[in-house]
Image (cartoon, rainbow, N blue to C red):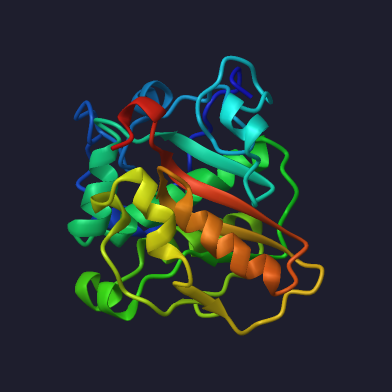
């Protein structure tokens, strides 16, 4: 996978909203990153198939996942959450730029197909609480999920998984408090007997949010849950 070249994504309809310049080098581009910066800043590299952290050998789980396998069956990510890529996440979430979610979703769809991963039965976003959704005006994970689902020609549903408890944003909590903070935060009324699900979020740091959402979906009968995330926080950058 690390030897593959990035395909040049076709210009989506929202490209008219983009200023026509690469965000990192200012070269002319109808996408947020030109092909050269995409290759340099979000490179295809070996990653743990369980949590998406960078590893030395393709397909080899990291030491943490060997000792503590996650509930989900596999993870795909585009790159690491650090400068300058983190600026896209901040702009998407706090600068009201949902088009960046569409771009992340399209890239994830390309990577999913390049890696030859099995298609899920349905794609779901990690939901926001009502309070957070009202504050931001949209759910970045849903903007990613629906574009990813479109790329894979799979259905997507923004409503079946719900966040029922509002709380402090995970990014503001120390790692050891994150699992406690999301325990019981998600519910799902739908049954998923024997179906494979793909859960989408923007960033994974501790994995607590994805772990809790996966637990709920497995309890509702899903045969497996995979996760797709835009960026993965490197262990040496975790708060």
The image shows residue 227 at horizontal and vertical percentages of 58, 51
Specify the quadrant of the image occupied by residue 232: top left
Q: In the displayed structure, would residue 189 be above or below residue 177?
A: below
Q: Quadrant of the N terminus?
A: top right
At x 59% / y 43%, what residue is drawn?
75
In the picture provided, is 29 more to the left or to the right than 78? left
Q: Residue at x 54, y 49 (%)?
A: 228
Q: Nearer the viewer, residue 147 or 88?
A: 88
- Image coordinates of residue 196 in percent, x first then y, are 73, 61
Count of marks overlaid on the render:
0
Which quadrant of the figure contains the C terminus?
A: top left
Relative to residue 3, is residue 178 depicted above or below?
A: below
Q: Is residue 25 left or right of residue 46?
A: left
Identify the residue at horizontal 17%, vertical 57% (top origin). 95
Q: Is residue 105 above or below residue 77?
A: below
Q: Is residue 206 above or below residue 166?
A: above
* Residue at far right of view: 194
- Residue at 75% across / 48% down in the picture? 118
Comparing 26 with 183, the one in front is 183
Q: Residue furthest top?
A: 56
Q: Nearer the viewer, residue 31 or 114?
A: 114
Percent position of residue 161, x then y? 53, 75
């Amino acid at each position: 996978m690390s030897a593959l070249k990035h395909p040049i994504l076709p210009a989506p309809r929202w490209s008219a909203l983009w200023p026509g310049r690469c965000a990192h080098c200012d070269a002319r581009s109808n996408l947020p990153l030109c092909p050269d910066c995409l290759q340099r800043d979000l490179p295809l590299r070996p990653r743990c198939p369980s949590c998406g952290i960078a590893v030395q050998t393709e397909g080899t789980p990291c030491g943490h996942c060997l000792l503590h396998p996650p509930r989900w069956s596999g993870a795909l990510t585009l790159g690491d959450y650090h400068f300058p890529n983190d600026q896209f996440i901040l702009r998407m979430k706090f600068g009201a730029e949902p088009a960046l979610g569409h771009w992340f979703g399209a890239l994830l769809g390309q990577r999913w197909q390049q890696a030859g991963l099995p298609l899920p039965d349905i794609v779901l976003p990690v939901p926001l609480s009502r309070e957070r959704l009202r504050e931001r005006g949209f759910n970045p994970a849903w903007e990613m999920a629906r574009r990813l689902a479109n790329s894979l020609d799979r259905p997507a549903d923004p409503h079946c998984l719900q966040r029922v408890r509002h709380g402090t944003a995970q990014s503001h909590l120390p790692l050891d408090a994150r699992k406690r903070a999301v325990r019981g935060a998600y519910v799902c009324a739908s049954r998923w007997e024997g179906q494979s699900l793909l859960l989408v979020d923007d960033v994974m740091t501790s994995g607590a949010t994805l772990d809790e959402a996966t637990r709920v979906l497995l309890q509702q009968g899903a045969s497996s849950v995979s996760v797709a995330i835009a960026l993965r926080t490197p262990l040496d950058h975790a708060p």
